[in-house]
Amino acid sequence: VQLQAFGGGLVQAGESLRLSCVASTRTVSGRTMGWFRQYPGKEREFVAALFRWNAGRTYYADSVKGRFTISKDNNKSTVYLQMNSLKPEDTAVYFCALDDRLILSSITTASAYDYWGQGTEVTVSS
């Protein structure tokens, strides 16, 4: 499985961006796709996840709840991260991840995901 993430860029605080992550394989019902971000010198941290593709259950880190929305396009095997009301502290490299057998208790754990896309950089200026 290959993942391609794109959509990052430079925006001002308060503005929006939408990240996209395209998977190279057709979706399966048990698929989970997640977004993580990484600050320089830090571990990747959980941002959002869509658990079990067909069920479409969504989960968010507290820091992004109410501002970010994860969604999917079944036809395109794509997951999106709509980021609104961006803050300077959202500046990071964002990665998408995929696993077809993840259990709910592991969705926030980066090491639990089998596949990763390349990062896309988001910079929010104040």
Image (cartoon, rainbow, N blue to C red):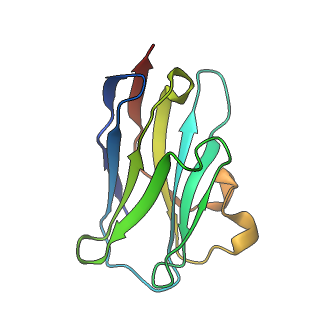
Q: Relative to 94, is 41 on the left or the right?
A: right
Instruction: Pick out the residue farthest to the right.
Output: 105
**Residue at the image point whose x is 47% and y is 86% from the top:** 29
Residue 28 is situated, as x and y percent measured from the top left of the image, at 43, 84
The image position of residue 31, as x and y in percent, is: 50, 76
Identify whether 54 is placed above or below 10: below
Q: Quadrant of the N terminus?
A: bottom left
Is residue 56 depicted above or below 67 in this figure? below
Residue, x 41% and y 52% (percent of image)?
81
Tell me if residue 46 comes above or below residue 115 in the rendering: above
Work out whether residue 35 or residue 62 is closer to the camera in this orientation and state it: 62
Q: Residue at x 61, y 62 (%)?
A: 59
Tell how many labels.
0
Tell me what residue is drawn at x 45 percent, y 32 percent.
86
Residue 99 lies in what quarter of the image?
Answer: bottom right
Looking at the image, the residue that sits furthest to the top is 126
When the figure is inspected, residue 44 is found, relative to residue 33, above or below; the finding is above
Residue 104: x percent and y percent?
A: 70, 73
Give the percent coordinates (x, y) of residue 48. 56, 54
125 sits left or right of 37 in the view: left
Which of the image's four quarters has the C terminus?
A: top left
The part of the image, by quadrant, that contains residue 60 is bottom right
